[in-house]
Image (spheres, rainbow, N blue to C red):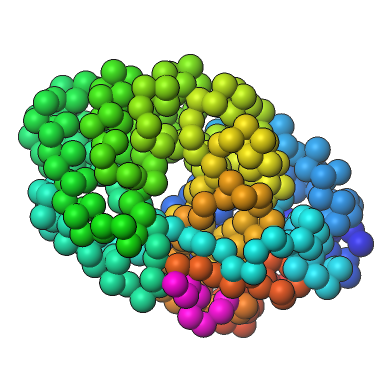
């Protein structure tokens, strides 16, 4: 089997990769929503793939892995890796999890990071109402992550939240940083207290907090949050689109409180998790398969974290329905340090009409059943997806 083409189309808001083989088997993968600018970066890797056997995933990846970088630039390499695994599974007529060592769980827990409702404001009662709405969603989530602080509009909407001025950048992930005010810190903690009063011990609460916090403020916040038994607080110091790790500062933060500290969604490759894990600089790591280099890279990081006593909660909120299939397959194989992965939805909603392989309902009591379909388990239906192709992508399924 040989690769004869690499194609990329923008479907809805997402770059979608198709690797075409000479035996009629195609592999598909989806980059994070909003990253339409990745298309030329993906296609730039085409010549390196042509003529290779897609079932030899690692051999192919050695030719392109050095072309990636921290989020968002690792995505081009990552989606190709997942499309290769999709072909390998289809060619062997087995689900990808069997190629990764086999599943150790029949269903995979997800945490809510994508099912959202309009937030009325940034008062404690607003956050309490929002959490209640998410708890009542039919998915039955057992863990919910709430954006707050620097990872929300709180930094702009609340006067004097911090000693700084938010940027006017239109780009998602613009880094706003600064010392927190006493008013801002007290409001943050009051909002968490209100959410925990609603959640009780029925639902685990995680917080997506930054990046943007100064180390001393982050330690102060983590200590203030200790009474609330949070699942984790995420990306206080770095994360999202920051192209660095800062393991030393994270270690100081982690040593300064019992509140679990989480980071890692922006990191590319296992090498850049090495110091975080070996120094026990965080309690939880959260690589994203669509940014870290793919599912095999994520699995290696999970295994390495496990032997260092660090938990695993992969990111994936905007990875779409093809990305959902990939997350289910790899997370089914992860060791016992796995908590849950971040649930991702179809955006726009017509994505649910152009794929096959999803269970119905998708999430039951906060978990997704592991698919036994060949490949990643979720596939595009060409005749249904074709009407949504952009004019210059009309040959994508030919």
Q: Nearer the viewer, residue 158 or 284?
A: 284
> Residue 33, can we see it?
no
Q: Nearer the viewer, residue 186 or 57?
A: 186
Percent position of residue 276, x then y: 55, 26
Q: Is residue 209 above or below residue 276?
A: below
Q: Nearer the viewer, residue 155 or 360?
A: 360
Percent position of residue 33, x then y: 47, 56
Q: Quadrant of the N terminus?
A: bottom right
Which stretch did the figure color magenta?
Answer: 358-365
> With 369 as the anchor, is 281 left or right in this view?
left
Q: Residue at x 16, y 22 (%)?
A: 163
Q: Quadrant of the C terminus?
A: bottom right
In the rendered image, residue 42 lying in the magenta stretch gets the answer: no
Q: Residue at x 13, y 34 (%)?
A: 186
In the rendered image, residue 360 lying in the magenta stretch gets the answer: yes
Q: Is residue 359 above or below residue 313?
A: below
**How many numbered marks, from 0 up?**
0
Percent position of residue 24, x then y: 83, 72
Magenta: main secondary structure equals loop
> Residue 23, can we see it?
yes
Q: Is residue 370 above or below residue 69?
A: below
> With 253 as the anchor, is 20 left or right in this view?
right
């Amino acid at each position: 089997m040989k690769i004869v083409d690499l194609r990329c189309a923008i479907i809805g808001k997402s770059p979608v990769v198709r690797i075409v083989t000479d035996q009629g088997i195609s592999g598909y993968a989806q980059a994070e929503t909003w990253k339409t600018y990745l298309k030329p970066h993906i296609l730039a890797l085409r010549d390196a793939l042509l003529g290779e056997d897609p079932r030899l995933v690692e051999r192919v990846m050695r030719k392109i892995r050095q072309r990636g970088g921290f989020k968002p630039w690792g995505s081009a390499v990552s989606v190709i890796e997942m499309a290769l695994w999709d072909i390998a599974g289809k060619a062997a007529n087995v689900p990808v999890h069997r190629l990764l060592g086999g599943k150790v769980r029949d269903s995979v827990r997800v945490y809510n990071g994508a099912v959202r409702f309009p937030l009325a404001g940034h008062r404690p009662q607003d956050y309490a109402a929002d959490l209640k709405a998410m708890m009542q969603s039919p998915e039955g989530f057992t863990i919910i992550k709430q954006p707050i602080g620097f990872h929300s509009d709180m930094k702009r909407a609340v006067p004097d939240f911090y000693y700084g001025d938010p940027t006017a950048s239109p780009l998602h992930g613009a880094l706003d940083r600064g010392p927190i005010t006493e008013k801002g810190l007290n409001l943050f903690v009051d909002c968490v207290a209100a959410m925990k009063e609603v959640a009780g011990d029925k639902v685990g609460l995680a917080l997506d907090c930054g990046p943007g916090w100064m180390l001393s403020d982050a330690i102060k916040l983590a200590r203030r949050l200790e009474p609330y038994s949070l699942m984790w607080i995420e990306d206080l110091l770095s994360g999202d689109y920051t192209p660095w790790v800062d393991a030393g500062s994270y270690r100081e933060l982690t040593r300064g409180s019992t509140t679990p500290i989480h980071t890692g969604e922006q990191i590319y490759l296992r090498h850049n998790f090495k110091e975080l894990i070996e120094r026990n600089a965080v309690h939880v790591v959260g690589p994203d398969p669509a940014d870290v280099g793919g599912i095999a890279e994520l699995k290696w990081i999970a295994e390495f974290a496990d032997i260092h006593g660090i938990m695993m909660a992969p990111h994936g909120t905007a990875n779409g329905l093809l990305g959902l299939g990939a997350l289910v397959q790899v997370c089914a194989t992860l060791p016992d340090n796995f908590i849950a992965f971040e649930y991702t939805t179809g955006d726009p909603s017509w994505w649910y009409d152009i794929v096959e392989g999803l269970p119905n309902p998708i999430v039951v009591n906060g978990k997704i059943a592991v698919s036994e379909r060949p490949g990643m388990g979720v596939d595009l239906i060409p005749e249904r997806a074709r009407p949504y192709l952009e004019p210059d992508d009309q040959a994508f399924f030919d």
